Image: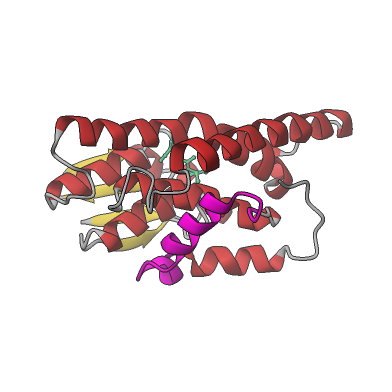
Amino acid sequence: MKLYYHPVSTTSRIAWLGAEELGQRCELQLVDLMTGEHMKPPYSDMNPNKLVPLLEDGDFRLTESAAILRYLARKGKSPAYPSDLQARARVDEMMDWFNSNMYKDLAYGLVYPQVFPTHLRPTEALQKGTLAWHKERTENWLAILDEKLIGPKKAYLTGDAVSIADYQGAEMIGLGDIIRCDYARYPNISRWMSRMKALPSWGKVNEVFYGFAASLKDKPFVAV
Ligand SMILES: N[C@@H](CCC(=O)N[C@@H](CS)C(=O)NCC(=O)O)C(=O)O
């Protein structure tokens, strides 16, 4: 299999972390987002969304990091995507929650407008308002995640065993490191993230991302 990716891209790191932890061997093919390689053929012919990641398995191509995680887990019949109907529904529930609730506010509303010039709002007032709005929403999701969804007892998002929802969610929460989010006041999230950051492949998958974050260490950010 081949994974088209960029190491700073959160959704690429979700798919890559999943592939590594699930033991699914993938050749990595860099798509240089910085030079716009994803915007033109041949990549844009493979993925008309012009986004990474993309998984290639023979002549089968798959986009969407969550779908890629599910594909890799099912291919390897991994317990990280349980076959039991209700256990699997819980994993799906968390994956949808992260994709539709947390990510839109934390990533698109708070991190990207401060980090990527293409996401900067056209006026100062708009930028300020966007950040304030999404910071509040992000804090709301973080409190729900901390107190209700993880809580004091669970080791992972859906119980005592790691699932593909953890790979997705941890990379999304980890994105906040780039604007120096302080998660210390969310003890259950902090505990879970420590566990996720201890995964064997976490360091390798996130090395370039942390380098990018370090390059922004003196830039002031609005963060949670
Ligand atoms: N829903 C997609 C989102 C993919 C996505 O947004 N990829 C970003 C990187 S994290 C990208 O390729 N951005 C390139 C651009 O915006 O030009 C997924 O989960 O795979």
Is 204 inside the magenta-drawn segment? Answer: yes
As drawn, 5 above or below 147: below
Q: What quarter of the picture does the N terminus occupy? A: bottom left
As drawn, 105 above or below 203: above
Q: Residue drawn 42% across and 71% down?
A: 204
As drawn, 86 above or below 154: above
Please, which colouring scheme is shown?
A: secondary structure
Q: Position of residue 153 (x, y in %)?
A: 41, 49
As drawn, 114 above or below 177: above
Of 90 and 176, the residue lying toward us = 90
Is 2 inside the magenta-drawn segment? Answer: no
Viewed as shown, does residue 158 lie left or right of 197? left
Viewed as shown, does residue 20 lie left or right of 97? left
Range of magenta residues: 183-205
Q: Main secondary structure of the magenta part?
A: helix
Q: Position of residue 9 (x, y in %)?
A: 50, 52
Of 157 and 213, the residue lying toward us = 157
Q: Position of residue 195 (x, y in %)?
A: 43, 62
Q: Residue drawn 38% across and 36% down?
A: 95
Q: Residue drawn 44% across and 31% down?
A: 97
Viewed as shown, does residue 82 lie left or right of 97? left
Q: Can residue 1 be seen in this snapshot? A: yes
Residue 82, quarter of picture: top left
Q: Residue drawn 55% across and 56% down?
A: 190
Of 160 and 33, the residue lying toward us = 160
